[in-house]
Structure formats: C-alpha cells, structure tokens
Amino acid sequence: MMQPEAGTLTVGTGDDTREIAALIRRGGSTAADQPGAGRPGLVWLGGYRSDMSGSKAEALCRHAGETGQACLRFDYSGHGASGGSFRDGTISRWLAESMAAFEHFTTGPQILVGSSMGGWIALRMVQELRAQGLSDRVAGLVLIAPAPDFTLELMEPELTEAQRAALERDGYYEEPTPYGPDPNVFTRALFEDGRANRVLDGLIETGAPVHIIQGMADPDVPWRHALKLVEHLPSDNVTLTLIRDGDHRLSRDEDIARILAAVDTIAQTP
C-alpha cells in the first residue's frame, strides 16, 4: 500500500505567514486493484490541540488506502508539524487554513470528517463552500463528538471569576488537561472570534448526509450538545449514533469501526 505524501502550504501574508503541514494519500487502485476513483475523498479535521498523527486520523488514512480513496490530513497552525503560534489561533484562522488546504490538495467531492472542534470547522467549511457555489464539493459529513460553538455554548457559562479576570487582564487563561502534559490555553481572541463563527443560531444547510457519533460519557462535550446540533440540521439525511460508554476521544477499536462504517455508508450514497 502506498504511503501518504508529505506536503506543505503557505497561508497568510507578511508577519502572518505560516506553513501548514499536510499528509496526502492519492486516490486510485487498492491492493486488490479495485479502483476507488468513484468514491469521494476524505478530509480529516482534527480537534483543539490535536494533530494529524492521532489514532483516528491514522485509521482513516489506512482505510482510504484499502478502499482506494484519497485522504487529506493536515495540522492547523500552532498544531503538530505546522508553523505559527498556537496562541494566535482562532476559529476564523483555522477555518481559513482548512479552506486553503481543501482547495489546494483536493479535487472533486469530499467527505469531511471532523472531530470535536473539527466538527465546528467542518460545518463552517460547508457554509463557506455553499456561499461560493461549491456545495457539490461536499459529499457528506461525519462528525465525531462535534463541538460547534463550544466557546459560547460550553465554556463561557462555566468560566470562573478568576478565568474571566485572566481573560480581561492577560488576554488568556490556562487550565490542565488530561490529554497531555501541557495546559490548555484559551485566549480572549478565541472567545470573541467564536461568536463571529456561530452555527447554532439558525438552520445549517449542508445539502449532504450527516452522521454524528457522540459518546454519552463524554466529559468535554455533553451528549445533549449533539442533540442540539441535530435540531439545527435539516431533518433528512441526518444520523445520530449515541455510544453509552463512549468518551470524548472515541478512539477505541469499536469506536473507530463505527466511524469508518459511517464514512463507508456516506461514500456509497448515490
């Protein structure tokens, strides 16, 4: 099986220039010489402070190789192998990078696979592509523990007085995370920009099937948040899978199998 190719993309200008690192698997024949050209490609959109080498992203890429599908993974600025400062990150900034990578590295219809914050990015990408008259580029969405509007809907109501004071005084606050040794950093710019990128304030027209996979034991994104997202999606072609013992990462073998099955279902949709 051919290995993914490494690629880079320059985004921004002047002092705001940053290099975005990507891994690209070309579509084509599988090991069994079965052409996969008829299937849409796959685009992985990771979560806050995650990168393209995570277990779900790796599994998606391997699966694409088995089915002959193209697959794009990349790191947002300030993440993984990409350049730029993490503290400069906002939804608008990471959305711009996602759109640039999508335009530069992919052709034809794609399935957007977004995890946590990547689910928010995926929904914003659909809105941007539809505004550009490119709705046919989206074959579907698979959203894993999606966290649209998480700054406003999930975080702001839980901010402590100390955190609010730090945002006002320093422009950021930190908090420990169980997902790594370094604390999470949340900036005032991230919160302010999040309001400008709200999607849960009206109907989200996708024009394509959507499959949401959500753990009910998720400590970061409550499963009722997924129900709220469903309320903002057209009633047709929306599937919600709730996993009673699923956590936020949804990286167990059985979780990944559900994700890949959802991708295959959409890929085979006429």
Image: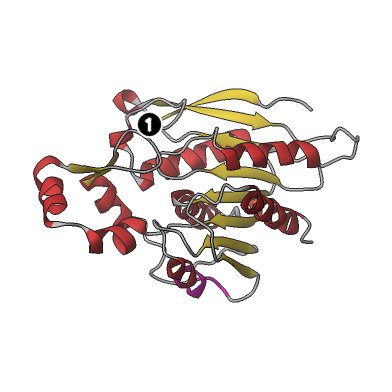
Can I make out residue 106 in this image?
no
Q: Is residue 245 above or below residue 255?
A: below
Which image quadrant: the N terminus?
top right
Q: Secondary structure at mark 1?
A: loop
Magenta highlight on residue 169? no
The residue closer to the viewer here, 85 or 223, is 223
Magenta highlight on residue 231? yes
Q: How many marks?
A: 1
Q: Residue at x 60, y 48 (%)?
A: 252
Q: Position of residue 92 (x, y in %)?
A: 37, 46
Q: Which residue is mark 1?
A: 78
The residue closer to the viewer here, 240 or 120, is 240
Q: Position of residue 22 (x, y in %)?
A: 55, 29
Can I make out residue 96 in this image?
yes
Range shown magenta: 228-234
Q: Residue at x 16, y 42 (%)?
A: 171
Q: Residue at x 56, y 73 (%)?
A: 234
Q: Is residue 216 above or below residue 236?
A: above
The residue closer to the viewer here, 108 or 162, is 162
Name the colour scheme: secondary structure
- The quadrant holding residue 182 is top left
Q: Residue furthest front?
A: 245
Which image quadrant: the C terminus?
bottom right
Does residue 70 appear to the left or right of 23 in the view shown? Answer: right
- The quadrant holding residue 189 is top left
Q: Position of residue 142 (x, y in %)?
A: 60, 56
The type of residue carrying mark 1 is: Gly
Q: Would you call the spot at circle 1 few (<14 residues within 10 Å), some (14-19), or many (20 or more)? A: many
